[in-house]
Amino acid sequence: MAKATITTDKGLKVVVEGSQEEVQNIVRQLGGGSGHGKKPSRQVEKTGKRLPSATDAILELKEEGFFDKPKALAEVKDKLASQGMIYPLTSLSGVVLGLVRRRRLGRVKEDGRWSYVSR
């Protein structure tokens, strides 16, 4: 009887026992090589719908006129959260700064803090 141990990318260990052919088929289906401690490749089923990236979401806010008046980064985070897109503030700061550098957004200093506006 053949045996294979497969560890998924989330740390789940799966032990498969059976005939050599059965074990090879299962390992092949899971995307593993020999099946001994290798992580199977992840195949994501495409549904046609994709969550927008933080950049896309922020640019969409810009198109909606959200940045017509200066907005603090926390306001951007709260607006995205109200739409079901939860991003940590630390992630958004780099995204917004990248948009400023690419001249998609502008920024102004108000009371010692940066606020972001449409360009």
Image (cartoon, rainbow, N blue to C red):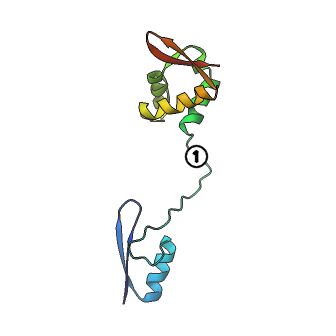
Q: Up-down: is 2 above or below 15?
A: below
Q: Secondary structure at mark 1?
A: loop
Residue at coordinates 45% horizontally, 35% vertically from top-left? 91
Residue 83 showing in the rendered view: no
Task: Name the outermost residue toward the front.
Answer: 101
Task: Name the outermost residue toward the top.
Answer: 111
Q: Nearer the viewer, residue 113 or 14?
A: 113
Residue 40 showing in the rendered view: yes
Give x and y (percent) for residue 62: 61, 24
Residue at coordinates 43% horizontally, 67% vertically from top-left? 39
Q: How many marks?
A: 1
Give x and y (percent) for residue 77: 46, 28
User: Residue tagged by mark 1?
Assistant: 50
Q: Quadrant of residue 60?
A: top right
Tag 1: residue type? Arg
Q: Quadrant of residue 98?
A: top right
Give x and y (percent) for residue 4: 38, 79
Q: Quadrant of residue 7?
A: bottom left
Q: Up-down: is 112 above or below 88?
A: above
